Image (cartoon, grey):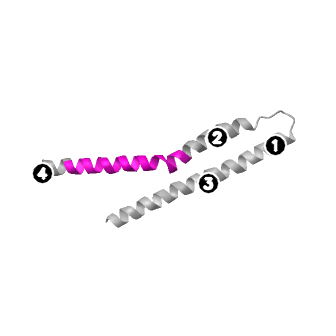
Amino acid sequence: MMDQQHDQEVKMRVKRISGFYQHLTIYILVNAGLAILDLISDDGVWFIYPLFGWGIGLVAHGLSVFLTEGWTKSWEEKKIQELLDKERRSD
């Protein structure tokens, strides 16, 4: 049972990482296209605004995938242990 749960957690982690890399790829392609359009037009430098705005979202996505999961997981493990200890004491 624990092996199945562990396998599911690993699959979910891989899926989250894959989602981030898909997001990154789309970000690069779209913003490269916007930069090209901006450079061939004479409307000034406007492509940096979506680049910056979307970049903030991309950084947040990356942090949620690569950093906060460790913090969340350790909190979850502590909470599970706390509840199990509490349950054992009440029996």
Mark 2 vs 4, N-terminal side: 2
Q: Main secondary structure of the magenta part?
A: helix
The residue to which callout 4 is attached is 91
The residue to which callout 1 is attached is 37
Q: Circle 4 sits in a helix, a strand or a loop, which is it?
A: loop
Q: CA distance from mark 2 to mark 1?
A: 17 Å
Mark 2 vs 1, N-terminal side: 1
CB contact under 8 Å: marks 2 and 4: no
Mark 2 vs 3, N-terminal side: 3
Magenta stretch in the rendered image: 62-85
* x and y, in percent, of residue 34 in the image: 76, 43
Crowd band around label 2 with a 10 angstrom C-alpha radius: few (<14), some (14–19), many (20+):
some
| Residue 67: in magenta span | yes
Could you tell me which residue is drawn at 36 percent across and 62 percent down? 5
The residue to which callout 2 is attached is 54
Please state which amino acid type lies under the numbered disc 3.
Gln
Please state which amino acid type lies under the numbered disc 2.
Trp
